[in-house]
Image (spheres, grey):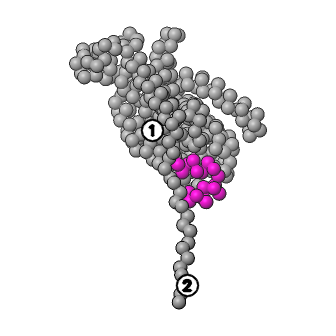
Amino acid sequence: MSAPAVARPRTAPVNRAVPVNPRAVMVSGALLVLTLALAVLTITIGELGIAVADLPAVLAHQGSRAQEWVLYSNRLPRLLVAVGAGAAFAVPGAIFQSVTRNPLGSPDVIGLGAGSAAGAAAAALVWPGVVPVPIGALVGGVVAAAAVLLGSGRGLRAPYRMVVVGIAVGAMAMAFVQFVLARTTQQEAVQLAAWLSGSLQSRQWGDVVTIGVALAVLLPAALALTRRLQIVEMGDDAATGLGVSPGWTRGLAIMVGVALTAAAVSVAGPVAFVALTAPQIARRLTGSSGPGMVAAACMGTTVLVAADLFAQHAPWGAQYPVGVLTAGLGGVYLAYLLVGEWKKGTV
């Protein structure tokens, strides 16, 4: 008689579902409510503001022509671009901070925002009508990312070297932008300079469509990578043991992050430090591990809408590009991070 077959133990499949953090859900919900309140303020305050009581009628196209112009041609496109760009800046920040395991690893710090700005500037002014601005921004971001990865020598395995190389790449990209400025007319140079500071002025529905399509395509891809990125943060050996390829995961995440950054830059310019600060503030509020894409997106939206509201109605009496405000606040936060990393002995 043949020996009875011995049942072999089976390895349990890795659960790829993203665990739900109740605290993260509460924080994200609170941020959405706060963003809605800021949106109402954006539409209703100021000299051309629409009264709250009139807002439902205007939204239903039953207001006066002046009110409908203010809402649909002036304030609503700007608001929606701020909402979309805030999320599109914050999610790549969460991605790059996760794949580099470095709190400084955001697209604006490592030169991707500047690369996208250089590509967009080239598309808009050097080759006008030949290359669409979003495509130019994407190409510039891809070139900057490749330069950072190659220049660091060891790629993502040397995150702090990436920061140093990224600063150099960003400087070269901005040098190209200055070259473009020197070749343009005075009026074009003024417009480009305002855009390079990160501006939401004079946004149109075409910009809303651009950032909306980018989020509709890329945000689900980023969310699908969340669980894999959480596993990769545990270390390459642990990720491989759990059936997750660290190289493929990082590569796909970087592609999504570069594309989102390019989309945001193409509609709002290189708004500084939203990608750096929003994911970290969200992670501290939620207390969750991993990139926390949803909370980061909600925080990025809240930060950019709030900053633009303040930039429009600041007490100094003039409207400034929103990037001026975020750069000032983000610079202080960057200094705080650098001091913290210096105390840890990592820089």
Front-lying residue, 248 or 26: 26
* Residue 245, picture quadrant: bottom right
Number of residues whose C-alpha sits closer than 10 Å to that of mark 2, classed few (under 14), some (14–19) or many (20 or more): few
Q: Amino acid at mark 2?
A: Ala
Q: Which mark is residue 263?
A: 1
> SS of the residue at dot 2?
loop
Residue 164 seen: yes
Q: What is the magenta range? A: 227-244
Q: Main secondary structure of the magenta part?
A: helix
Q: Which mark is residue 136?
A: none
Front-lying residue, 134 or 237: 237
Q: Amino acid at mark 1?
A: Ala
Residue at position x 75%, y 34% from top?
A: 342
Q: Is residue 18 magenta?
A: no
Above or below residue 199? Residue 41 is above
* Residue 201, picture quadrant: top left
> SS of the residue at dot 1?
helix
Above or below residue 54? Residue 234 is below
Front-lying residue, 189 or 4: 4
Residue 176 seen: no
Give the labeled residue for mark 2.
3
Q: Quadrant of the C terminus?
A: top right
Label 1 or label 2, whichever comes before in sequence order: 2
Residue at position x 58%, y 58% from top?
A: 242
Residue at position x 64%, y 38% from top?
A: 103
Q: Position of residue 123 (x, y in %)?
A: 44, 38
Q: Residue furthest left?
A: 62
